[in-house]
Image: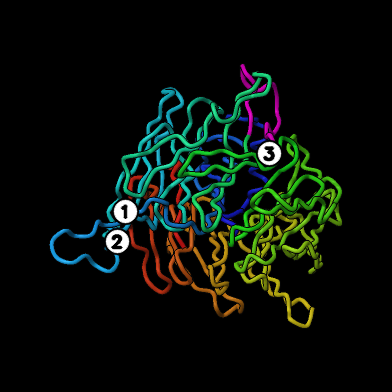
């Protein structure tokens, strides 16, 4: 599932690339999930590190999560010595799990050490500190809920990937500079975005680099590689070397990885086999910046195919558009439709966000006079046609993504200087429902299930950043207050 995702993401990425490494997920978003996270997941961890404050209200893209198996070595009870032994040993206590995790830290650019915490929200709603570190961000739950992966900042533009048990107390380094040595010693490598492989405790990740002595100018500073790391054994394995990969997305069943490069889309088995390059090829897309645009593959819930939007070469041209495709794990490509929109940096809901069942997509288009944006929904009909409806126009639009059952799409409207509102909409206009009345800012959003959502935001003009849970049709419930605009979130679903 595509996480967190992506309102204003392409524009954020362009700005980050111009600022080089050292600006900066809240998330991967983005895994990195996702993911999906994220969302992200946020955008900053896809390109850089959170070394500079995040603007209030800027959504983060976060990491994507996938299901994970119970760790090896689960305890079992010994047979009793008094009386006859049981037919089977009695299982020991279940490993602690976490369903909601979040990170937060106070960013102080004067103080180089900004200690923050990794939290698990307990079953009783009480936040529990699992680990502390320097600027922890972008937590990603293994979907058995027993492990949380996250990043910490060890220097400006330099990060490490850590892991902590849901039981807390044993946070440890998973991937750092020693595991990612530079071939010639001229750069420092860091993990970037990451996602869990379903049915395992293995993370897929890529890396970025920082030249010794700091950046020498604008640019992405990405290695465009692909790795795995086993969180139980710390074994790091290369899947694709530098320059061979790009943006990646892992299928929900953990079997296949979609890879988006500046001029092509590839498929790769999760074990590194069956590498299929250029399932789709396309011209490079202008970004008017120093980063190369790479499409956003979005897997459907069954893991059998993903959908993607590929922009026209010049997103600022009068005829700017995007072609929408469905691509199966067998490499079969189906053209869905073409939309007349600049999906690189022309709307708040960019890239277009596909539903987990692959039947619907939302995207937005800004009005030429700047008076707002129109939110568009497309439906791919069984007979091959395309149905459409629109909402708006409205100012201050952000798109947050589909519920896991593909019933609702969440978005928010937060006009500058005025209280806003969150909304979810189904597939018909009369299905619009409000949430988070008085919302002024939102940073991270996650669906917990088909009717319950969690978000980090501000409700009311004088409110602090807080974590809320809300079931549709009821009022939001405060889970944790007093957070900062660096807080990031992941939810087990």
View extreme (left): residue: 82
> Earlier along the polypeptide chain: callout 2 or callout 3?
2
Which label sits on residue 225?
Answer: 3
Query: Can see residue 341?
Result: yes
View extreme (front): residue: 84
In the rendered structure, the answer to whether residue 260 lies left or right of residue 116 reads right
Q: Residue at x 27, y 69 (%)?
A: 87
- Mark 3 and 1 residues: CB-CB less than 8 Å, in contact? no
> Earlier along the polypeptide chain: callout 3 or callout 1?
1
Residue designated by label 2:
91
- Disc 3 element: loop
View extreme (top): residue: 213
* In magenta stretch: residue 215: yes
On screen, residue 155 above or below 163? above
The label nearer to you, 3 versus 1, is 1
Q: Distance between the Cα atoms at labels 1 and 2?
A: 7 Å
In the picture, the quarter occupied by the N terminus is bottom right
**Image quarter of residue 262:** top right
The label nearer to you, 2 versus 3, is 2
Q: Which residues are magenta?
A: 208-225
Q: Residue at x 47, y 41 (%)?
A: 233
Q: Residue at x 45, y 41 (%)?
A: 486
On screen, residue 109 above or below 325? above
Task: Provide residue 338's location: percent of width, then percent of height.
Answer: 81, 65
Q: For the residue carrying disc 2, how many other residues have a C-alpha within 10 Å: few (<14), some (14-19), or many (20+)? A: few
- Mark 1 and 2 residues: CB-CB less than 8 Å, in contact? yes
Q: Distance between the Cα atoms at labels 3 and 1?
A: 37 Å
- Mark 2 and 3 residues: CB-CB less than 8 Å, in contact? no
Residue designated by label 1:
75
């Amino acid at each position: 599932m595509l996480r967190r995702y992506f309102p204003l993401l392409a524009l954020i990425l362009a700005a980050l690339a111009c600022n080089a490494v050292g600006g900066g997920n809240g998330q991967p978003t983005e895994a990195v999930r996702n993911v999906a996270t994220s969302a992200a997941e946020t955008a900053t961890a896809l390109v850089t590190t959170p070394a500079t404050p995040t603007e209030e209200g800027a959504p983060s893209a976060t990491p994507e999560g996938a299901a994970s198996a119970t760790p090896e070595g689960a305890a079992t009870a010994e047979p009793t010595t008094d009386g006859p032994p049981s037919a089977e040993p009695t299982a020991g206590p279940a490993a602690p799990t976490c369903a909601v995790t979040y990170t937060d830290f106070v960013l102080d650019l004067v103080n180089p050490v900004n200690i923050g915490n990794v939290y698990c929200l307990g079953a009783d709603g009480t936040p529990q500190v699992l680990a502390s570190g320097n600027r922890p961000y972008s937590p990603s739950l293994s979907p058995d809920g027993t492990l949380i992966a996250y990043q910490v900042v060890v220097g400006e533009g330099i990060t490490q990937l850590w892991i902590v048990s849901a039981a807390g107390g044993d946070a440890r380094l998973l991937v750092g500079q020693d595991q990612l040595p530079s071939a010639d010693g001229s750069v420092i490598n860091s993990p970037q975005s990451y996602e869990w492989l379903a049915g395992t405790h293995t993370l897929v990740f890529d890396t970025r680099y920082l030249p010794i002595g700091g950046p020498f100018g604008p640019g992405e500073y990405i290695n465009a590689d692909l790795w795995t790391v086993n969180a139980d054994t710390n074994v790091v394995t290369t899947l694709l070397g530098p320059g061979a990969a790009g943006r990646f997305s892992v299928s929900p069943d953990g079997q296949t990885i979609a890879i988006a490069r500046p001029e092509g889309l590839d498929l790769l088995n999760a074990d590194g086999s069956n590498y299929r390059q250029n399932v789709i090829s396309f011209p490079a897309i202008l970004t008017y910046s120093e980063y190369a645009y790479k499409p956003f593959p979005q897997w459907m819930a069954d893991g059998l195919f993903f959908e993607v939007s590929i922009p026209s070469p010049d997103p600022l041209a009068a005829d700017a558009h995007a072609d929408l495709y469905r691509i199966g794990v067998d490499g079969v490509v189906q053209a869905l439709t073409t939309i007349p929109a600049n999906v690189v940096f022309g709307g708040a809901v960019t890239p277009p966000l596909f539903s987990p069942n692959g039947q619907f997509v939302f995207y937005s288009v800004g009005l030429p006079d700047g008076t707002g944006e129109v939110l568009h929904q497309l439906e791919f009909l069984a007979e091959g046609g395309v149905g459409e409806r629109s909402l708006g126009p409205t100012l201050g639009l952000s798109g947050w993504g589909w519920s896991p059952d593909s019933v609702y799409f969440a978005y928010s409207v937060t006009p500058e200087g005025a209280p806003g509102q969150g909304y979810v909409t189904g597939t018909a206009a009369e299905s619009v429902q409000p949430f988070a009345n008085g919302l002024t800012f939102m940073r991270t959003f996650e669906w917990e299930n088909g009717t319950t959502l969690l978000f980090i935001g501000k409700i009311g003009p004088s409110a602090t950043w807080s974590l809320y849970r809300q079931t549709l049709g009821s009022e939001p419930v405060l889970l944790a207050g007093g957070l900062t605009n660096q807080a990031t979130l992941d939810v087990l679903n």
